[in-house]
Image (cartoon, grey):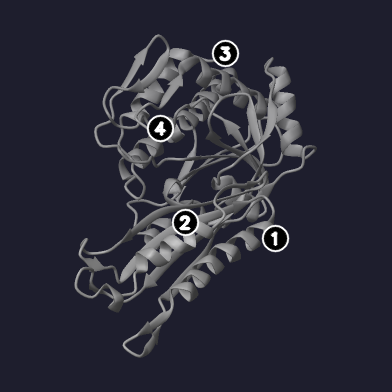
Amino acid sequence: MINQQRLSDEFARLAAINSPSLHEGQVALYLERRLRTLGGKVCYDQAAAATGGEVGNLVARFAGTGKETEPLLFSVHMDTVEPGGHVEPVLRDGLFSSAGDTILGADDKAGIAEIIEALEVVREQGIPHGEIELVVTIAEEIGLVGAKQFDFGLIRSRHGYALDTPGIDWMVLRAPGANRLRVEITGRESHAGVAPEMGLSAIQTAALALAEMPLGRIDDETTANIGRIEGGVACNIVPRRVFLEGEARSHDAEKLQRQTELMVDCFVRAADAMSRQIAGELCRPQIKVDVQPDYPQMAVDEDAPVVELARRAAAAAGQDLKARVGGGGSDANIFNANGIETIILGTGMQNVHSADEQVAVADMAHVARLLVEIIRQA
């Protein structure tokens, strides 16, 4: 049923097109032409204007044939992380990897190739189906930016599948929500050797905050991280300013709020601890914290129709599809928040966001077979 050679060729073509976030114009043009050859009606939304990207989110609509059912959504993203550039996909013993020190781009081009192959099979076999809506977003890798700017008025689907998690035979029903923190600490600079007592170190303030801050795995639903710190001018200057970026994630909204507030409070208490008299004046590091909701949590019930459809399709394909809890955010978080019940399916990609990224042709064929059955069973 699945043409593995065609699927392999499709993935190789996609992977070779460089498409870092907000620079997806070339791959979008390829997808526009490719999806139209499959009978899709293709349009773009206005996300390019909102994001400063080369192109907006792509929507391809495939009319139903011989079956009156509700529209069914499939979602993938067209951007990839760095390092990209000249990506050269290499196939050895049925396994794709990158020939150089770039990423491969299986995240998420494996998912794109799988849905294209599924659409090829559905058309070849004349499988009756309802309307299919495919959304290919931009800028997913830099914070679900494309999905956040997506014009949901362009689609009618109320349930669907996002192809965007490692491995196969997995469906993610729950994923955390996240807050992003940006912190600026302003102290007082001074010569570190001549008059250190006249300075107020922003880096030391940050260190005190981080030493107290619960980070990593907080509990089975919550994580936190400070992922970026930058500051100081030279080793002989008490640093006046430091910038930090971090995040908190949780499957529970109250826990997410508590963890975020605790992280902010650690910076405030560190500033209080650093306060002292300098030249007769009480000086305290200034803390500026910007907390932005990054994405909302998603939770789809085990007995939801979209889950039951996936289970029926897996049984028809002879596959054992299991549910699991996700630890990261995806476009599915945004689709669920906008009233489209969406679960995440594994695409077979492995070691993503690294030069060791891989995907097996057999695994992509496995997923494409599942997608065909989902379309058939819908």
- What's the residue type where badge 1 is placed? Glu
Kindly report the distance in space between the C-alpha atoms of the residues bearing marks 1 and 3: 47 Å
For discs 3 and 2, the disc positioned in front in the rendered view: 2
Q: Which mark is residue 1?
A: 3
For discs 4 and 1, the disc positioned in front in the rendered view: 1
Q: Cβ–Cβ below 8 Å for labels 3 and 4?
A: no
Left/right placement of residue 317 relative to residue 240 reads: right
For discs 1 and 3, the disc positioned in front in the rendered view: 1
Give the structural element (helix, strand or loop) at label 4.
helix
Q: In which quarter of the image is residue 187?
A: bottom left
Of labels 3 and 4, earlier in sequence is 3
Of labels 2 and 1, earlier in sequence is 2
Q: Residue 34 carries which label?
A: 4
Kindly report the distance in space between the C-alpha atoms of the residues bearing marks 4 and 2: 39 Å
In the orientation shown, which residue stands out farthest toward the bottom?
A: 280
Which residue is pictured at 54% across the width and 45% down the height?
A: 330
Kindly report the distance in space between the C-alpha atoms of the residues bearing marks 2 and 1: 19 Å
- What's the residue type where badge 3 is placed? Met
Kindly report the distance in space between the C-alpha atoms of the residues bearing marks 3 and 2: 46 Å
Give the structural element (helix, strand or loop) at label 3.
loop
Label 2 CA crowd tier, 10 Å (few <14, some 14–19, many 20+): some
In the orientation shown, which residue stands out farthest toward the right?
A: 303
Kindly report the distance in space between the C-alpha atoms of the residues bearing marks 4 and 1: 45 Å
- What's the residue type where badge 2 is placed? Gly
Q: Cβ–Cβ below 8 Å for labels 3 and 2?
A: no
Give the structural element (helix, strand or loop) at label 1.
helix
Q: Mark 1 points at which residue?
A: 254
Q: Mark 2 points at which residue?
A: 246
Q: In this view, does 362 lie above or below 300?
A: above
The C terminus - image quarter: top right
Taking depth in this image into account, of 215 and 249 the one nearest to the observer is 215
